[in-house]
Image (tube, grey):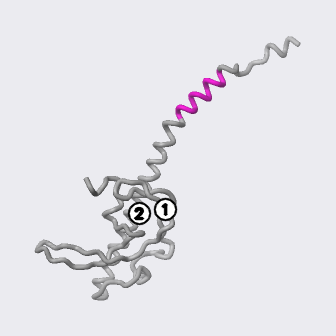
Amino acid sequence: MSNFFNQRGFATLEVILMITVLGILSAVAIPRFTAITTSANTAKVQADLSTIDSAIALYQMDNGKAPSQISDLKDYIQDLDNLKPPSGNVYVNGNETDLSKETYKLTDVTVTGNNSKTSTEKRAAIGSYTSSDITKQSSST
């Protein structure tokens, strides 16, 4: 019977304190991890849209016209069929938005030049957003 009382282990108070400390650490770490993941997803979408915009410019130089659909850029983007948005949230005009169900596409954007003339050009988009919308800062500030 004396061996039973001499066994070493954690007391109930020690276990409660350890769980409390782990809970506090989790409460601090998880939101930071989520914010970092969203920032990484935002950077990937920005890079993808920039790559597609560059491919559009190359296509226009080679063909004298804008591509009509994103599949026209297959010779300009390696592995275009597997170019997909990341899963998870992305910052769109400062707000977290889930764009993982969206696909990359081409859209017409109206551009105002230096002499106040407007023109339309093809741009890469995800959903209804172009690269200028994919940012952590709100565009209204």
Residue 26 appears left or right of 73: right
**Main SS type for the magenta part?**
helix
Tell me which residue sits at (48%, 75%) in the image: 79
* Mark 1 secondary-structure assignment: loop
Residue 120 appears left or right of 52: left
Task: State the image coordinates of residue 57 (x, y, percent, origin top left).
Answer: 30, 78
In the image, residue 84 sits, relative to residue 64, either above or below, namely above
User: Which corner quadrant holds the N terminus?
Assistant: top right
Other residues around mark 2 within 10 Å, as few (<14) / some (14–19) / many (≥20): many
In the image, residue 40 sits, relative to residue 61, either above or below, namely above
* Amino acid type, residue under disc 1 in the picture: Pro
Residue 117 appears left or right of 13: left
Q: Which residue is farthest front?
A: 140
The residue to which callout 1 is attached is 86
* Amino acid type, residue under disc 2 in the picture: Val
Is residue 16 on the magenta stretch? Answer: yes
Label disc, if present, on residue 45 of the rendered structure: 2
* Mark 2 secondary-structure assignment: helix
Tell me which residue sits at (48%, 43%) in the image: 31
Tell me which residue sits at (29%, 75%) in the image: 109
Q: Quadrant of residue 111?
A: bottom left
Q: Which residue is farthest right?
A: 1
Asked if the residue under mark 2 is in contact with the one under mark 1, i.e. CB atoms within 8 Å, the reply is yes
Which span of residues is magenta-colored? 14-25
Task: State the image coordinates of residue 135 (x, y, percent, origin top left).
Answer: 34, 57
In the image, residue 3 sits, relative to residue 129, either above or below, namely above
Q: Quadrant of residue 56?
A: bottom left
